[in-house]
Amino acid sequence: MAKTTTRKTPTRRKSSKKKTSLFSPKAIVFLLLFFGLIFGIYHYREAILYYFSFKTHKKVETDKVAEVRIYQVLKKHEDKVFGFDVSQFQGEVRWEAIDSIEEKFPLKFVFIRATAGNDKEDTRFDENWAEAKKHHFIRGAYHYYRPNENSLEQAENFIKTVKLRKGDLPPVLDIEKLPENQSLDSLKVGLKRWLKKVDEHYKVRPIIYTGEKYYNDFLKDEFSEYTFWVANYNFFVENIKDDWLFWQFTEKATVDGIEEHVDINIYNGSPKMLEYLTIN
C-alpha cells in the first residue's frame, strides 16, 4: 500500500501591528482643543485686536487674559452705565485723571467704602467722598459688614460717618463672610436690623452687595424686597443677569488716576434710570 502525504496549508500569521484610527481618543481630544481655541479666538476677536493695538502707559502690571475679558464685557454692555469702587486699599486717588476705562468706556459712578464693622472708618473715605462729588461722579457709600459684631452698632457707625445728599446713590450693605460664632438665622436677623436702621435714617431702602454664590445660597429668597449688587468674576460669564441691579465683573481693571487694580461695575439700566435711582 502506497504512502500518501498530506500537504499542510500554511497559516497566515496575524499582524501584531494595531491599526491607528483617525478618531482615537487622543485625536478627538486634540480636535476638541483645536476647535475650542479657534472658537475662543473668533469669539474674543475684537477684544484681542483691541488689546494688541493698544499701547498702554499704565504703571500697574496688567493681566492680559483679564484685560481681554474686561474689554469683551464692556463692549457687550455699551448701552449700560459703567462705574468703579474704591477704598483705602487703592491708595491716594487722582480724581482729576479718572475719565474712562480702556480710554473708550466712560466711568459715571463710584461706590466708596465708608465703614467696616462697629468702629472702623475707611481712612480715605472723607477725601474720596468729597473728591467724587467735586469731579461729578454719581457717588454711593458702602459698609463692610462683620458678621460677628453687633449689627445696630455697625449701622450707627455707618450713619455717623456718611451724610447722603441729593444725587447720591442709596446706602450699600456689603456682606461677604459667614459668621464664626452664630447661626445663619442669627446672621440674617442681624442683617435685617442693619438694613431697617439705615432705611429709617436715610428714608431710602439700601442695596445689598455680595458674591453670586452667597446671593443664591443665602439672600436671594429671604431678602427679595431688596436690590442687589452682585460680584461674579467668572471668565465665561459675559452678561449681566436680570435680577442684578449692579454687576461687579472684575477686580483686575486698571484706570488712570488709580495706582492699584480696581473693581469695575455695570449698572443694569440706562443713564436716565441711574439718575432715578439716586436720592432726590
Image (cartoon, grey):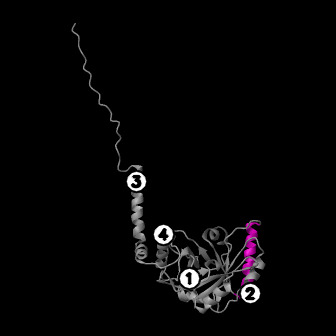
Nearest to N terminus: mark 2 or mark 3: 3
Amino acid type, mark 4: Val
Structural distance between the alpha carbons of marks 1 and 4:
21 Å
Number of the front mark, 4 or 2: 4
Structural distance between the alpha carbons of marks 3 and 4:
26 Å
The residue at the point 56 percent across, 87 percent down is: 273
Is disc 3 surrounded by few (<14), some (14 to 19) or many (20+) residues within 10 Å?
Answer: few
Is disc 4 surrounded by few (<14), some (14 to 19) or many (20+) residues within 10 Å?
Answer: few
The numbered disc on residue 126 is none
Residues 104 and 43: in front is: 104
Is disc 1 surrounded by few (<14), some (14 to 19) or many (20+) residues within 10 Å?
Answer: many
User: Helix, strand or loop at disc 3?
Assistant: helix
Amino acid type, mark 3: Ile
Q: Which residue is mark 2?
A: 201
Nearest to N terminus: mark 4 or mark 2: 4
The numbered disc on residue 83 is 1
Structural distance between the alpha carbons of marks 4 and 2:
44 Å
Can you give x and y, in whole percent of width and height, for residue 101 in the image? 50, 81
What are the residue bounds of the magenta stretch? 182-203
For the residues labelled 1 and 3, say whether their Cβ atoms are less than 8 Å apart.
no
Amino acid type, mark 2: His
The residue at the point 74 percent across, 68 percent down is: 185
